[in-house]
Amino acid sequence: MGRYAEKTSVSYEKSMDDISRVLRRYDCDAVSRTESRDFWKVEFVIRNRMIRFQFNYPDPNANKYRFTDKGKERTEGQAYAAYEQDLRSSFRALYISILSKLENVESGLFEFEHEFMAHIVDPWSKQTMAEIMTPLIAERYDKTATEPTQLLLPGPKGK
């Protein structure tokens, strides 16, 4: 099975705009898009919760762009084209992911917190629930751990 939208011609800028449009359509508030050299993120408020989706840009010099699936080296132009195609595909997948989560909640298929849990921003630490919980889950499943630790959110940080 191939990757979603792996051959899309939709520019990643159009997908960014589509994300903003769908957030407006579902009455999200305080929508903020941030782009840096290393990442792109969108944050918004819905149901009194701050939500963050962040896409970290891949390394354009990674071997997956420099070489074909069969190991043949690509030209610089071909490598750049493969990188651009990967960005188009990734942003299209991000768009459809956000759209489907919003629609799943709107249609009553899933509860809001369940659908967006990993992307809800903790107001104390400013981290997403995924950023907080991922290391704790890994610790729980670590076969060398002698005692299970509690999966609790950290409290407010001192000033």
Image (spheres, rainbow, N blue to C red):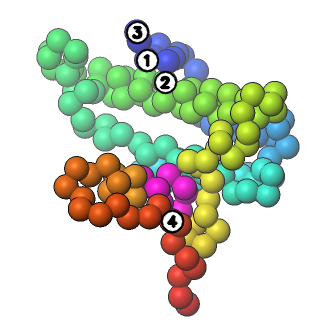
- How far apart, in angstroms, are the residues tagged by discs 4 and 1? 35 Å
Quadrant the C terminus occupies = bottom right
| Amino acid type indicated by mark 3 | Met
Residue at 41% over, 26% down? 86
Comparing labels 1 and 2, the label whose residue is closer to the camera: 1
Which secondary structure lies at badge 1? loop
Task: Give percent across and percent down for residue 37.
Answer: 43, 51
Residue 6 x %, y %: 45, 16
Q: Which residue is mark 4?
A: 152
Instruction: Check the image and report above or below for 27 versus 64.
Output: below
Q: Give the Cα distance between marks 3 and 2.
A: 15 Å
Give me the C-alpha separation between circle 4 and circle 2: 36 Å
- Point out the stretch of residues depicted in magenta: 127-134
Q: Secondary structure at mark 3?
A: loop
Q: Is residue 62 left or right of residue 35?
A: left
Tell me the number on the disc at residue 89.
2
Report if the CB atoms under discs 3 and 2 are less than 8 Å apart: no
The residue pinned by badge 1 equals 3
